[in-house]
Image (cartoon, rainbow, N blue to C red):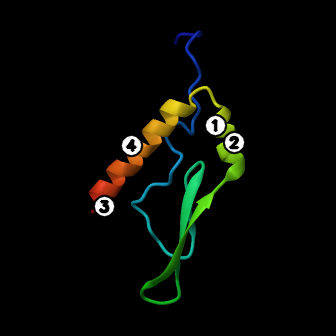
Amino acid sequence: MNQNAEHIPECYGKMFPPLSDRSPNRVHQGHVFGFFIRSYGLMPSGQEAVVDEKAWKQCSQCPHYRTCYDLSLGRLQMEAAIAG
């Protein structure tokens, strides 16, 4: 392994949660962004976006921020397309 290789964080490309699990009544969290689907019965009754402001601040200061954000958005769009 090249000791001069730049360290890529474990969270790279994972700002958003996977969309494959949409179980209600729990937060689905990526490294920064997440969502919550509220359900009191058979049908969802509400949803909300969740943002971890501390993680966002850390991400925006990371030297890999731009490419990580692009990869995260690409993964999110691909998962949304597959989910239909």
Q: Quadrant of residue 62?
A: top right
CA–CA distance in space, label 4 to label 1: 18 Å
Left or right relative to 63: residue 72: left
Label 4: which residue?
A: 74
* Label 2 environment density (alpha carbons within 10 Å; few <14, some 14–19, many ≥20): few
- Mark 2 and mark 1 in contact (Cβ < 8 Å)? yes
> From the image, which quarter does the C terminus lie in?
bottom left
For residue 83, which numbered disc appears in the image? 3
State which tag comes first along the sequence, 2 or 3: 2
Label 2: which residue?
A: 57
52 w.r.t. 42: above or below: above
62 w.r.t. 29: above or below: above
Label 1: which residue?
A: 60
Nearer the observer, 14 or 33? 33
Q: Image point 45% across, 55% down: which residue? A: 18
CA–CA distance in space, label 3 to label 4: 14 Å
What secondary structure is found at the residue carrying circle 3?
A: helix
Q: What's the residue type where badge 4 is placed?
A: Gly
Q: What's the residue type where badge 3 is placed?
A: Ala
- Mark 1 and mark 3 in contact (Cβ < 8 Å)? no
Q: Position of residue 13 (x, y in %)?
A: 49, 39
